[in-house]
Amino acid sequence: MKFLVDAHLPRKLVAQFKALGHDALHTLDLPKANRTPDADIVAQADADERVVVSKDADFVHAHTATGHPARVLVVATGNISNVELLALFARSDRAIAVAFATCSLVELRRDALVLRGPATGVPP
């Protein structure tokens, strides 16, 4: 899968995704880095067929209202250490890929994945 990790999440998550065999970018990798406007993040993710990974509910609202970004993985863990977050993603990697085969909006919680949107036809 291809991911674009938002500024609210650690850059180490990109390294984790890559170690798991995924293609991943962080907003720090974009020309405007963490000052990249949400609209530019959405455009980049959709152009590259990436899942936006964020804690920011604005991406959820935009997806629900407009269908863009095409796919969103919202991190809904509350306060969590980076070590715990990375471990959660490692444990959930396969389930996330399976979820995006049928859904366009997935919520990652500490204890479950919540599938919240229909598939958009974009392959995982």
Image (cartoon, helix red, strand yellow):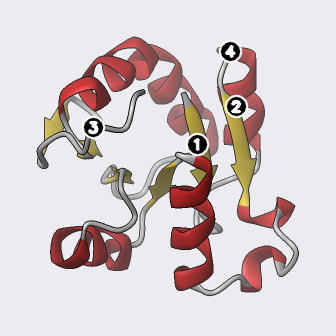
Image quarter where the C terminus lies is top left
Residue depth check, mark 3 versus mark 2: number of the one nearer the observer: 3
The label shown at residue 121 is 3
Q: CA distance from mark 4 to mark 1?
A: 11 Å
Q: From the top left corner, tell me how far across and down residue 73 is, in percent.
A: 37, 48
Query: Mark 4 falls on what kind of element?
Result: loop
Give amino acid for label 2.
Answer: Asp
- Residue positioned 29% across, 36% down in the render: 110
How would you rate the neighbour count of disc 3 (Cα within 10 Å): few for under 14, some for 14-19, many for 20 or more?
A: few
Front: mark 1 or 3: 3
Quick one: label 4 or label 1, which is nearer the N terminus?
1
- Disc 1 target residue: 3
Query: Residue drawn at (25%, 66%), measured in percent from left and top?
Result: 67
Residue 50 x %, y %: 54, 46
Q: How many marks?
A: 4
Q: Amino acid at mark 4?
A: Gly
Q: Amino acid at mark 3?
A: Gly
Give whichever of discs 2 and 1 has the lower sequence position. Answer: 1
| Mark 3 and mark 2: Cα distance apart in space | 19 Å
Q: Are marks 1 and 3 in contact (CB under 8 Å)?
A: no
Question: Looking at the image, is mark 4 or mark 3 nearer the viewer?
Answer: 3
Structural distance between the alpha carbons of marks 4 and 3: 22 Å
Quarter holding the N terminus? top right
* Nearer to the camera, 43 or 106: 43
Q: Residues within 10 Å of mark 4 (few under 14, many from 20)?
A: few
Q: For residue 102, which numbered disc appears in the image?
A: none
Using the numbered discs, state the Cα–Cα distance from disc 2 to disc 1 in whole angstroms: 6 Å
Work out whether mark 3 precedes mark 2 in sequence or the reverse, and give the earlier one: 2
Q: Quadrant of residue 61?
A: bottom left
Q: Reading the chain from its start, which is encountered first: label 1 or label 3? A: 1
For the residue labelled by badge 1, is the local secondary structure a helix, a strand or a loop? strand
- Residue beneath label 2, please? 23
